[in-house]
Image (spheres, grey):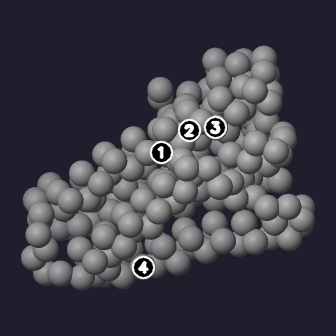
Amino acid sequence: MIETWAIILIHQILFQGMFLVKNYSLSRKIGVKIRGHNIEATVSVLFFALFIIVAFAISLFEQPFGKIQLLDDLNATVLGCALLTLNLVISAASLINMRESWRVGVLEEQQTQLVTSGIYRFTRNPYFVSYFLMFAAYTLLTQNLILMMLTSIGILLTHIMIIKEERYLYGVHGKAYIEYKGEVPRYLFI
């Protein structure tokens, strides 16, 4: 069976690779910055990096601190890999469907098109849903209480960032955003 650290490494190469390619190609194409420098985005990006580093570090140890047995190793690996596959599919769809409206954090000085098609018909925040899937997958793969606690913090930080984005989108798109918000859940079912 493939080692957990290798699964996390391969996943991060693919996941971060898509993110970096999208950011680089879009910023070159439109000629403006696409990364907002607001506190919510900065804290979340730093937290996501910390979560990934901690997950990778935990995966390197045979018996790490905080080890819990959620599932047997085979089922944890299979379910974790299934969640990571779904993470990659959702994040790729999110990056593709957002087209030139993709931004990392809120850039108040820029007005982008409201995207409601593709994967955005099912969730208003598919890229963040993909992060939730990654949190769950890494927690399952490592079966670790520390990552379980970090997952809770990650969900809270992401929610705070989404609330800021929702205020921005309402301010820019008004009634169109309210209608969209009424039709499509913030995450998947809520």
Q: Which residue is mark 4?
A: 9
Residue 170 % position (x, y): 72, 26
Query: Marks 2 and 1: in contact by CB < 8 Å?
Result: yes
Earlier sequence position, callout 3 versus callout 1: 1
Query: Marks 1 and 3: in contact by CB < 8 Å?
Result: no
Query: Marks 1 and 4: in contact by CB < 8 Å?
Result: no
Q: Residues within 10 Å of mark 3 (few under 14, many from 20)?
A: some
11 over 170 or under it: above or below: below
Residue 13 % position (x, y): 52, 78
Dot 3: element: helix
Residue drawn at x 56%, y 27% is 185
Amino acid beneath label 1: Thr
Residue drawn at x 31%, y 70% is 54
Residue 30 % position (x, y): 89, 61
Residue 60 visible to the viewer: yes
Q: Which mark is on residue 162?
A: 2
Gap between marks 1 and 2 measured at Cα: 6 Å
Gap between marks 4 and 1 measured at Cα: 23 Å
Q: For the residues carrying marks 3 and 4, which lies nearer the camera in this image?
A: 3
Location of residue 37 by image quarter: bottom right
Q: Which mark is on residue 165?
A: 3
Dot 2: element: helix
